[in-house]
Image (cartoon, rainbow, N blue to C red):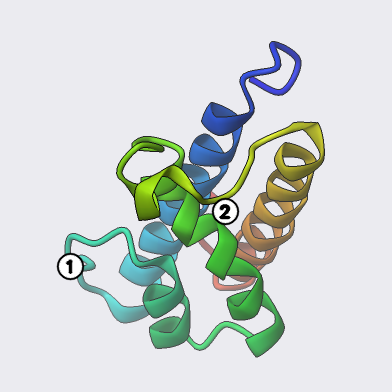
Amino acid sequence: MLEADIYDACALYCQQAVEKMLKAYYMVKLQQEPRKTHKIVELAEELGLPKALVDDLHDLETDYIQARYPDVFFGGGGTAYDDSVAQDRIETAERITGWLKHRLTEEGHDG
């Protein structure tokens, strides 16, 4: 999506990747299915992720709605998606999913 200059979709798919990894880790760590939610900040807090990582999730969480429905999100006055924003979201998603993959590997669930 980044290479195709479809920046809003890039942000959305970064959010989705993080959400799915958080839910996988939730299932492994808590031995139960997570509730149906897109609130990745809450999931991360429940799982005890470091505060720095949780803080990084706020923009991605907002992207779930804003990137999908730009006209609805605060009257359309949210993030202007561009290459810089998309790169930031990719870096955030890679950092968070990398941390989660490491934790899953440490716990013997390397998939």
Return the residue at label 1.
35
Pick the residue in front: 91 or 70: 70
Picture coordinates of residue 29 (x, y %)? 39, 77
- Residue at x-position 41% and y-position 38%: 70
Q: Secondary structure at mark 1?
A: loop
Q: Secondary structure at mark 2?
A: loop
Query: On the rendered structure, is 81 left or right of 15?
Result: right
- Residue at x-position 31% and y-position 80%: 30
Residue 29 in view of the camera: yes
Picture coordinates of residue 18 (x, y %)? 52, 53
Q: Amino acid at mark 1?
A: Arg
Pick the residue in front: 56 or 99: 56
- Mark sitting earlier along the chain (2/1): 1
Q: CA distance from mark 2 to mark 1?
A: 23 Å
Return the residue at label 2.
110
Pick the residue in front: 62 or 43: 62
Up-down relation of residue 111 to residue 29 (above or below): above
Give the quadrant of residue 49: bottom right
